[in-house]
């Protein structure tokens, strides 16, 4: 029995190595894993955390497709309940569509060269009373986009859509998406003329330690 167990252990080890090597050779995960090397050195995490601020004035300079792709990698690296990954991302480059989206609420009216709509696909989310977990999943993805944008020197502004009924319906109409895909947030992205100062909103009174 010991000999059989030893043989099986070694077979499993070899197979695992083959699968891992195949993944790297076929570039399944290597691209995402090496993203930070491809784009060069990023800011340190602490610097990104404190530099992330909401920007409402943007330059007309367009964001490179490579950087948009990087942000999508970051967005989909976030956690989701039971790994359902119920998110959908709409990259809005078209000036006409961006103009319509800016009018959805008075808080979304900013002139940015790029808008990303993050929406939840409720058919892919958990069922019944757990369905609303998609909101947390997509919120985590949005925060990853904001932090990722900061690390790339790109300004951002997260404008909430859900739970406002009318703005959600307006965005669904503008983008021509079905009712089970619910827009959660509208993100303005673009380069800014001035770099915002780092800021911490730490408040010790909000921390409650139970020992």
Image: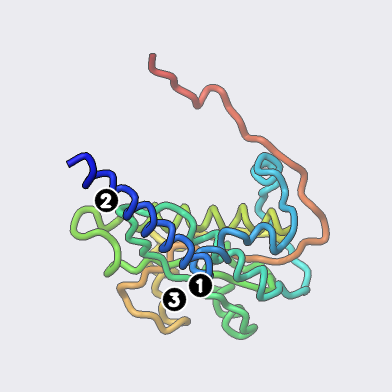
Q: In screen coordinates, is 135 left or right of 129?
A: right
Residue 209 on image: x %, y % = 43, 19
In this rendering, is residue 129 above or below 199? below
Please provide percent x and percent y for residue 171. 45, 75
Q: Which image quarter is the C terminus in? A: top left
Closest to the observer: 43 or 26? 26
Of marks 3 and 2, the one in the foreground: 2
Q: Badges 3 and 2: C-beta atoms under 8 Å apart?
A: no
Q: Residue at x 77, y 74 (%)?
A: 60
Q: Is residue 132 left or right of residue 44?
A: left
Instruction: Identify residue for label 2.
Output: 8
Q: Nearer the viewer, mark 1 or mark 2?
A: 2
Q: Is residue 106 visible?
A: no
Give the CA distance from mark 1 to mark 2. 27 Å
Q: State the SS at label 2.
A: helix
Q: Which mark is residue 26?
A: 1
Residue shown at 20%/54% (left/top)?
129
């Amino acid at each position: 029995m010991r000999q059989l167990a030893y043989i099986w252990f070694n077979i499993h080890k070899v197979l695992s190595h083959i699968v891992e090597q195949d993944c790297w050779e076929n570039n399944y995960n290597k691209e995402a894993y090496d993203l930070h090397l491809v784009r060069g050195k990023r800011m340190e995490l602490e610097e990104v955390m404190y530099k992330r601020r909401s920007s409402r004035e943007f330059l007309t300079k367009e964001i490179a497709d490579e950087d948009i792709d990087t942000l999508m990698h970051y967005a989909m690296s976030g956690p989701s309940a039971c790994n359902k990954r119920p998110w959908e991302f709409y990259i809005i480059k078209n000036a006409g569509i961006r103009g319509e989206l800016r009018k959805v609420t008075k808080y979304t009216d900013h002139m940015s060269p790029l808008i990303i709509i993050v929406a939840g696909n409720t058919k892919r989310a958990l069922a019944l009373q757990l369905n609303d977990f998609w909101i947390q999943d997509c919120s985590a993805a949005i925060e990853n986009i904001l932090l990722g944008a900061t690390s790339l020197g790109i300004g951002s502004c997260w404008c909430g859509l859900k739970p406002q009924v009318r703005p959600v319906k307006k965005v669904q109409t503008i983008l021509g998406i079905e009712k089970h895909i619910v827009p959660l947030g509208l993100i303005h992205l673009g380069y800014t003329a001035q770099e915002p100062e780092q800021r911490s909103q730490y408040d010790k009174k909000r921390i409650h330690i139970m020992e």
